[in-house]
Image (spheres, rainbow, N blue to C red):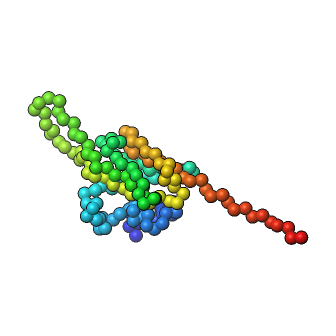
Amino acid sequence: MSLVGINGDLVNHLFNFPESFEKLTFPSQEHESNENKGVLSIPVDILDTPKEYIFYMDVPGLSKSDIQVMVEDENTLVIRSGGKRKREDGEEEGCKYLRLERRAPKKLLRKFRLPENANVSAITAKCENGVLTVVVEKLPPPPKSKTVEVAIS
């Protein structure tokens, strides 16, 4: 089993996600569709707290106006960006770059199937210092059923 498969199984187990979650979260290069060619997958850290799921993604050089966060198909969190990082131009005429090592990001796309206890109406996102943080609140747990013993007369 590949390292990706191990990570996918671990995440699925920790979050109780269905097996299809791995296909959305850990797409393989061989299944890349024409629609997603040239699209980079955003690396992500997912924190499971008692009250919410928190997604952390590095998006260097992108502003909040370059990023879209939405929910599709009722439970799929989609994060995308078609924004391009601007290169700093020389202030004086005749300035030119001697080296260009920082690649401007292409389109970014990441999809996550949210678990059943995710409150899709209560999702917030902020972008600060090149890190996008998306917080998905959890729904309160369903009330536990009570067992009531009835005395027989």
Residue 19 image position (x, y, % from top left)? 45, 68
Residue 56 in sight: yes
Of all residues shown, which one is farthest toward the top? Answer: 92
Q: What residue is at 56 percent from the left and 53 percent from the top?
A: 139
Q: Nearer the viewer, residue 104 or 99?
A: 104
Q: Position of residue 18 (x, y in %)?
A: 48, 66
* Coordinates of residue 140 in the picture (x, y in percent): 59, 53
Q: In x, y percent, where is residue 109?
A: 33, 55
User: Which one is nearer the viewer's eye here, 122 or 134?
Assistant: 122
| Image mark count | 0
Q: Is residue 151 above or below residue 99?
A: below
Residue at (26% x, 51% y) in the render: 106
Q: Is residue 7 above or below residue 58?
A: below
Residue drawn 54% across and 57% down? 117
Q: Quadrant of residue 30?
A: bottom left
Residue at screen point 44% across, 50% down: 55
Above or below, 87 relative to 141: above
Name the residue nearer the viewer: 72 or 111. 72
Quarter of the image containing the C terminus? bottom right
Q: Is residue 103 left or right of residue 51?
A: left
